[in-house]
Amino acid sequence: MKNYEVVIGLEAHVHLLTESKAFCGCSTKFGLEPNSSTCPVCLGLPGSLPVLNEKAFLYAIKTALALHCKIQNLIKFDRKNYYYPDLPKNYQISQYDMPLAYDGVIEIESQESKKKIRVKRVHLEEDAGKLMHEAEKGVSYVDFNRAGVALLEIVSEPDIHSPEDASAYLVNLKAILKYLKVSDCNMEEGSLRCDANISVRPEGAKALGVKAELKNMNSFKAVRDALSYEAKRQIDLLAAGEKIQQETRLWNEARGLTIAMRSKEDTQDYRYFPEPDLVPFTVDKNKIDQIMRSLPELPQAKKKRFISDYSVSEYDARVLTREADVSDFFEATIKTYNNPKEIANWLLGDIASLLNARKVSIAKTKLKPGHLAEMLEMIHSEEISGKIAKEVLPEVFENGLSPKEIVRQKGLKQIKDSGELTSIIELVIKENEKSTNDYKAGKKNALMFLVGQVMKKTKGKANPKILNNILKNMLGGK
Amino acid sequence: MANTKAIDKKTVEHVARLARVNLSAQEIGIYKKQLADILEYINKLGKVDVKNTLPTSHPIGKMKNVFRKDNMKKSLPVEDVLRNAPNKKDSLFIVPKIIG
């Protein structure tokens, strides 16, 4: 069988974090009463005029610069015309032939090698309303609260060649957007959405194959799954000597497949023309320089710095820098407890599991960098064991008390007192005659069992070193 | 340059579908002629000498960079928003089903 190359381009849509919509003062808040955040402008009532939200514009420029894009000299808006009930004006204010920015790049790590995915264009537009369907009743419901919310469209060149790389691209894009604080990138609430163009071609071929546009992928996993499915579908068709139709296909998460949505004769014809209600925009060189200087350290740069400054592994550095909240927490903890590797282990291990289980970001929990530093210090000075620390951590998460206070309240402090330990060990030896004799007969494993029994009686609080010494002494170990 | 693309029956049907308008055979004939007349009229612009004219991207001369601050304003009351809706339920507009 012939080998095929998969060619993928991604189109990400991102809600910008503004208080009000792109062209009117209606709130962008998620989950309001349907249609309660609408006005003559976003409903397209006659006589209303849009005025661009300055913050949305600056966020768009900021994002474009962080993606290494060039900024258009003259920025204008266009009307994209189509009839669909989610669009009250029957056109969307968007940008057509002169996107706000172009020719950028996003770096990804692909199986430990780095790749540059080119960004073709970044443009500003308004979102459409939300449709909910009730098939049995033959009706759809329309909520226009989302209509008019500032949306940034980021389009990649077809430089991506696997579903994994597509996912890596999105992960990195999301990290950058969150560092810039221009979007919350909440996929569940639709503030980060992604469509994909995918085609396949025989390996070595120059011309691109016929592409399908994939929609309705609501998570990074869905993007990966949908692209894997679609690549295989297209390769199977070509291998069987069949042709691929250019079409839009919807990812069906429940069934794990893509379904054709629009037929060919329905190809879109958007009849773009310049939006006469909005004047053109320019950003002068000084303003661009000023925004450039205000850009925060971005994930790639931070990752490199973590590796060189803190000697953490490439992998640890990548995961630590994926979210600004986590990398900030990491660095704040180092300030009071200077052991980056230990901090990284806890952040990427137990703390990450707690965050995942609660689906919250670290900045929104009661756990503060000072808590983690204090807890690690207690392990270091043998006040508590690592095992006890794992019990203390969730408590800090829940009630925000300091680890010291939790250890005090719950009496979790290590037992280092020889007298106290000796009496417990005596009891364990008495209760486990067989293991005691086994050990004396040379079975080293029996010691572990006895240690375990002491730990059980002390609820894990016995200091392991002291316990071992006393136990060996009492058993007459060599 | 004059746009020489002829307005044929297919073009009228295409434009009608984009506008979600149903046309009878007779109407298609009427609009074919009317659209052709309009295009012919517009095409007169092609004869104008624009060698020394800069492209105009917007009718309002030099005005640019008109912004509003990112401040929230009061929206319309939901009753007003839905006042002209032929069909509604619980603050939502109802339209014929879109996806089956």
Image (cartoon, rainbow, N blue to C red):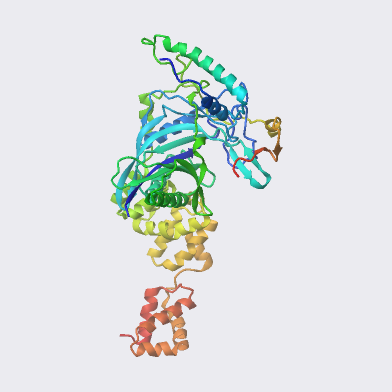
Where does the image place residue A299, in percent across and percent down from the top left?
A: 37, 45
User: Residue A323, relative to residue A462: is it above or below?
Assistant: above
Q: Quadrant of residue A389?
A: bottom left
Query: Toward the viewer: A3 or B22?
Result: B22
Residue at 49% of width from left, 68% of height from top? A412
Q: Is residue A378 visible?
A: yes
Query: Toward the viewer: B90 or A179?
Result: B90
Q: Quadrant of residue A205?
A: top left
Q: Is residue A339 visible?
A: no
Question: Is A478 left or right of B18, judged from the image as shown?
Answer: left
Where does the image place residue A56, in percent across and percent down from the top left?
A: 48, 32
Question: Is B66 left or right of A30, judged from the image as shown?
Answer: left
Q: Quadrant of the C terminus of chain A?
A: bottom left
Residue at 43% of width from left, 57% of height from top? A372
User: Residue A395, relative to residue B14: is it above or below?
Assistant: below
Query: Toward the viewer: A149 or A300?
Result: A149
Where does the image place residue A474, in percent across and percent down from the top left?
A: 38, 85
Q: Quadrant of the N terminus of chain A?
A: bottom left
Question: Is A446 left or right of A311, judged from the image as shown?
Answer: right
Where does the image place residue A385, in percent across and percent down from the top left?
A: 42, 68
Residue at 48% of width from left, 20% of height from top? B6
Exactly how many numbered labels are in the figure? 0
